[in-house]
C-alpha cells in the first residue's frame, strides 16, 4: 500500500477497538513467566554453553600480547575466542567501533575475548585467567578540552548548519538579548534487561535469540559482520526488557555468541553483565550548547541562534541537539550549527529522543531566561512565539500543531496562575517552585510490512518482525487488525520479533507504533479484498463488523472465506513525500512543581503534568504509561543521571546502577497526562504519530525552571545536583 495522499475516511475511524484503553494482550504471559526474553530460551536447544565477555582494560592503544592458555585449560572451558582466532570480521554499517577489538583498542571495555564454558561460573572464573598486556596510546577524553578541535560533521540525514536571514545583525540590534552556555552530560540507557543473546549454528545457518529493537537491521548487520549471506541469518526477539535506543544496533553479545557457538560447536548464551554495558555499548554523548536569543520588548523573538558541540569516536556522528530549535519557535533571523569532536570514549549513539532530549534541556531553560529578562510569564512568551509553519521554510506548514492549546490547557489544569515570584513560596524547610517547558519531537515514519492469516474458525494471526520493547506493540497491532477486520480483539493472535516474518519499521525514534500499525492495516485491507472477492461480495462496498462481511444486502461470516483452507496475505505500507510537504511533529507542555530543601539543596519533585498532542492515540492506557515512563526518565536527566568520565584513563567510572542513579515512578507522588483530541490525516492511515519520546523532551528543563522559581538559583549544567544549588540558597533560619 502506498501512502502518498492524506488519509480519508477508513475502517480505523470507527474506533470500536482502536483508541480504547485495553489491557495488554501479552500481560498474562509476562506475569506468568511464559514470555521469553533473550536469556530465557531454555527449550530451543540442548545443552547451551555460556560465554563470558572480557573487555579491554585501556581506552586507547593496542594489545601487545594476550595469553589464553590458562583459561583454555580451566575446568569446563570449551573455547576462547579472540580477534586472533575469530577469522576475518566485517564492520557493521551502524557500528562505529568493532564489536571484537584487537589488536587495536578503540575504547575502554571494548570486547577483546569471549570465554565459553559448560557453566556461567566456569566461564567467568576462566576469564580471570586470561592475561593481556597493552601498549597504551594517548587518548582524547574531554569534550571541553577538544571543543576547539571540533569540526563540521559530514554526511548524515540532518544538515550540520542552517541559516535564514541575518542572525548576527538581528541579534546585535535586538532590544533584549540572551547569550548563555549550557551543558548536558553523557548518559546511559540503563534498561532493565541487559544485552543478551543465544546463538546456534545448523550447518551454515545461524539463529540468534537476542534482545534487539530493529530485527531487519540486525539481521543485515550480523550477516555483514560475520561475512555470510543474510538469508543464512535468523534473529528472534519477541520480548525486550527495555531498549531506549541502546538496542537499535547489533552489539557484542550477538556477534560473540555466534563466534563462540562456532568455536565450541554448541549453542552459546552470552549476556553483557551490567558493569560492562556503560562502556562496551553505546550511550548518549555529552553536549556543550551556546544559545543566543534576541527579542523585542513586546516579547517577539527576532533572532534565534543555537550552536552545539558533541564528541564521538573517529567515524561517528554528532548529537543533533539543534534540530528542535529549527522548528519550535518563530523568529525571522536564525542560525544553527553542530560541531563534532573526536573522542576516544565509548561510542555515542541514539538514546531516547536523540537530539531533542539534550537540545531541549538547554533551549527550554534559555526560553525561560529570556522571558524572565522581558518580565513576561514563560507560558505567555511561548504562546506569543508560536508558529504554524517551518520557520526556516515558511512555505512548509505543520500538518497539525496544537502547541498553544497544550500550554493553555496545561496551565489551567496545573494551577499555573498560583505561581509566585522566585524564592517566595515556602513549605516548612522546602522552597516550592513551578516550572514549564515545551515538549517537541518529530513524527517520522518508515516502511513497514506484515503478514496476515485467516483460519477457518475465524481467527486471525498477524506476523511481523516488529518488536515490543515494553511499549505495547502486541496490543496496538491486535487492535489494528481487529478494527480493520471487524473482529473482537480476542480473535487476533500476534507474533512479533522474528526475521522470518515480513520486515517492519522496528521500535525506535517514535516511528514504531504508527508505522508498524499502518503496515498491519495495509495487510488487513488486502485481506479484506481477498475475503470479499472469495465470498463474491463487492470489495469496494463490503463492510466488516461483528465477525461478518456484508455488501449488497448479503451478509456472511468472515470465517466462511477460509472454509476450504487458510488465507494468507502480505503487504507493507510505503510512505510518499507528505513529510516533505508538511512538518509532521508532536507537541506537549510539561509542568513540574518541586520542593528544594533550604538547608541542603536537595530537590524533590512533588507533582508533574504533561499535556500532549500526538495524533490519534491508539491505546490511551499504554500511551499514558509511555508518557509517565518518559517523564520519570526526564526527572533522572534533570537531577541525577550522569556518566562520570575519568578524563585521565578514559572511561565511565559509575558503570552500574549503584553509581548511575535512575529514578522510578514511585519517586514522584503525582504524575498526570492529558492527550488532546487529534487525528493527523497526513501521518498515516492510522492518523497517529507517537508519544514514546515526546514525554521526555523538555521535562528536564521544566524541572530546572521549577528549581529556579523555587530558589532563584539558575543552574545551566546538568544534572542539577544539590552542590550546584546550595551555594545560592537564601540565608533562611
Image (spheres, rainbow, N blue to C red):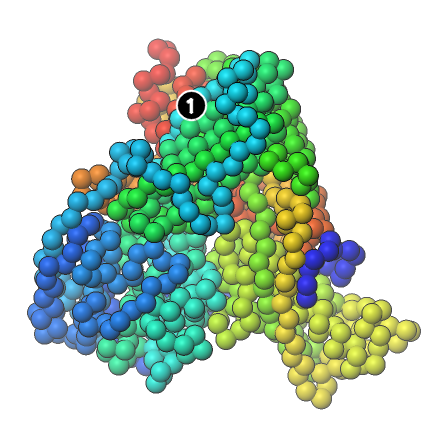
Quarter of the image where the N terminus is located: bottom right
Q: Residue furthest right?
A: 553
Question: From where the camera sits, is residue 329 visible?
Answer: yes
Vertical position of residue 417 compared to residue 571: above or below: above
Residue 10 at x, y percent in the picture: 77, 59
What is the x, y in percent for residue 409? 66, 31
Name which residue lies at 49% across and 43% down: 159
Q: Residue at x 74, y 67 (%)?
A: 486
Q: Along the horizontal axis of the image, is 225 left or right of 275?
A: right
* Frontmost residue, 174 versus 210: 174
Residue 609 in sight from this viewpoint:
no
Note whether 488 is above or below 133 in the view shown. below
Q: Which x, y percent locates residue 241?
A: 42, 58
Asked if residue 234 lies left or right of residue 296, the reply is left
In this rendering, the answer to whether 52 lies above or below 134 is below
Q: Secondary structure at mark 1?
A: strand
Of residues 128 and 228, which is closer to you in this image?
Answer: 228
Determine crowd level at label 1: few under 14, some 14-19, many 20+ residues with C-alpha closer than 10 A: some
Q: Is residue 1 above or below residue 439?
A: below
Residue shown at 46% from the left, 41% from the top? 160
Tally of numbered discs? 1
* Among the 4 quarters of the image, the one containing residue 319: top left
Q: Residue 447: x percent and y percent?
A: 59, 62
Q: Looking at the rendering, in which quadrant would you find the C terminus?
A: top left
Report the residue marked by disc 1. Answer: 180
Depth check: give the residue in front, 470 or 237. 237
Residue at the farthest bottom position: 564
**Residue drawn at the location 61% of the way across and 73% of the way down:** 451
Amino acid at each position: 500500500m502506498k501512502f502518498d495522499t492524506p488519509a480519508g475516511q477508513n475502517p480505523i475511524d470507527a474506533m470500536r477497538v482502536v483508541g480504547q484503553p485495553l489491557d495488554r494482550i501479552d500481560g498474562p504471559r509476562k506475569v506468568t513467566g511464559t514470555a521469553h526474553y533473550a536469556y530465557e530460551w531454555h527449550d530451543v536447544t540442548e545443552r547451551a554453553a555460556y560465554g563470558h565477555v572480557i573487555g579491554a582494560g585501556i581506552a586507547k592503544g593496542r594489545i601487545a600480547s594476550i595469553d589464553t592458555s590458562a583459561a583454555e585449560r580451566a575446568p569446563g572451558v570449551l573455547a576462547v575466542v579472540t580477534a586472533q582466532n575469530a577469522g576475518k570480521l566485517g564492520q557493521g554499517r551502524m557500528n562505529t567501533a568493532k564489536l571484537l577489538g584487537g589488536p587495536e583498542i578503540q575504547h575502554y571495555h571494548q570486547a577483546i575475548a569471549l570465554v565459553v564454558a559448560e557453566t556461567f561460573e566456569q566461564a567467568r572464573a576462566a576469564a580471570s585467567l586470561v592475561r593481556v598486556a597493552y601498549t597504551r596510546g594517548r587518548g582524547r577524553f574531554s569534550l571541553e578540552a577538544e571543543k576547539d578541535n571540533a569540526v563540521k560533521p559530514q554526511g548524515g540525514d540532518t544538515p550540520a548548519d542552517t541559516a535564514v536571514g541575518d542572525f548576527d545583525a538581528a541579534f546585535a540590534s535586538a532590544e533584549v538579548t540572551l547569550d548563555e552556555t549550557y551543558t548536558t552530560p553523557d548518559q546511559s540507557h540503563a534498561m532493565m534487561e541487559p544485552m543478551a543473546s543465544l546463538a546456534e549454528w545448523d550447518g551454515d545457518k545461524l539463529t540468534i535469540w537476542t534482545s534487539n529493537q530493529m530485527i531487519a537491521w540486525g539481521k543485515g548487520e550480523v550477516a555483514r559482520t560475520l561475512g555470510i549471506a543474510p538469508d543464512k541469518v535468523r534473529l528472534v526477539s519477541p520480548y525486550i526488557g527495555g531498549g531506549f535506543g541502546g538496542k537499535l544496533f547489533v552489539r557484542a553479545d550477538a556477534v560473540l555468541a555466534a563466534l563462540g557457538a562456532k568455536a565450541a560447536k554448541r549453542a552459546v548464551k552470552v549476556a553483557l553483565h551490567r558493569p560492562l554495558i556503560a562502556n562496551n555499548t553505546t550511550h548518549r554523548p555529552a553536549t556543550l550548547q551556546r544559545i543566543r536569543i534576541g527579542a523585542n520588548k513586546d516579547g517577539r523573538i527576532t533572532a534565534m541562534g543555537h550552536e552545539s558541540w558533541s564528541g564521538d569516536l573517529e567515524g561517528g556522528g554528532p548529537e543533533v541537539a539543534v534540530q528542535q530549535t529549527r522548528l519550535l519557535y518563530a523568529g525571522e533571523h536564525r542560525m544553527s550549527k553542530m560541531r563534532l569532536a573526536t573522542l576516544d570514549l565509548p561510542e555515542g549513539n541514539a538514546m531516547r529522543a536523540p537530539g531533542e532530549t539534550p537540545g531541549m534541556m538547554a533551549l527550554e531553560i534559555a526560553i525561560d531566561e529570556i522571558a524572565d529578562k522581558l518580565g513576561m510569564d514563560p507560558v505567555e512568551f511561548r504562546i506569543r512565539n508560536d508558529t504554524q509553519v517551518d520557520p526556516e521554510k515558511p512555505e512548509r506548514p505543520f500538518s497539525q500543531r496544537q502547541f498553544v492549546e497544550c500550554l493553555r490547557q496545561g496551565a489551567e489544569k496545573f494551577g499555573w496562575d498560583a505561581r509566585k515570584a522566585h524564592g517566595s513560596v515556602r513549605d516548612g524547610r522546602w522552597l516550592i517552585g513551578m516550572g514549564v517547558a515545551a515538549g517537541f519531537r518529530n513524527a517520522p515514519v518508515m516502511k513497514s510490512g506484515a503478514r496476515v492469516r485467516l483460519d477457518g474458525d475465524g481467527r486471525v494471526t498477524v506476523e511481523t518482525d516488529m518488536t515490543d520493547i515494553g511499549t505495547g506493540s502486541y496490543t496496538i497491532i491486535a487492535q489494528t487488525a481487529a478494527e480493520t477486520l471487524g473482529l473482537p480483539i480476542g480473535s487476533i493472535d500476534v507474533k512479533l520479533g522474528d526475521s522470518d516474518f515480513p520486515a517492519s519499521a522496528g521500535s525506535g525514534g517514535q516511528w514504531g507504533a504508527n508505522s508498524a500499525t499502518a503496515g498491519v492495516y495495509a495487510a488487513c485491507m488486502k485481506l479484506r479484498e481477498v475475503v470479499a472477492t472469495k465470498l463474491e461480495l463487492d470489495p469496494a462496498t463490503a463492510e466488516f463488523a461483528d465477525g461478518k462481511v456484508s455488501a449488497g444486502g448479503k451478509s456472511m461470516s468472515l470465517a466462511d472465506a477460509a472454509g476450504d483452507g487458510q488465507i494468507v496475505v502480505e503487504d507493507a505500507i510505503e510512505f510518499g513525500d507528505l513529510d516533505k510537504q508538511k512538518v509532521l511533529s508532536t507537541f506537549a507542555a510539561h509542568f513540574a512543581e518541586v520542593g528544594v530543601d533550604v538547608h541542603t539543596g536537595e530537590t524533590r519533585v512533588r507533582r508533574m503534568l504533561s499535556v500532549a498532542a500526538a495524533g490519534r492515540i491508539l491505546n490511551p492506557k499504554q500511551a499514558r504509561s509511555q508518557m509517565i515512563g518518559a517523564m520519570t526518565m526526564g526527572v533522572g536527566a534533570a537531577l541525577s543521571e550522569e556518566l562520570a568520565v575519568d578524563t585521565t584513563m578514559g572511561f565511565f567510572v559509575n558503570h552500574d546502577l549503584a553509581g548511575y542513579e535512575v529514578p522510578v515512578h514511585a519517586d514522584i507522588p503525582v504524575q498526570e497526562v492529558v492527550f488532546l483530541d487529534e487525528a493527523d490525516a497526513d501521518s498515516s492511515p492510522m492518523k497517529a504519530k507517537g508519544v514514546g519520546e515526546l514525554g521526555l523532551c523538555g521535562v528536564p528543563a521544566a524541572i530546572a525552571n521549577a528549581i529556579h522559581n523555587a530558589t532563584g538559583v539558575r543552574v545551566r549544567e546538568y544534572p542539577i545536583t544539590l552542590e550546584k544549588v546550595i551555594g545560592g540558597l537564601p540565608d533562611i533560619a
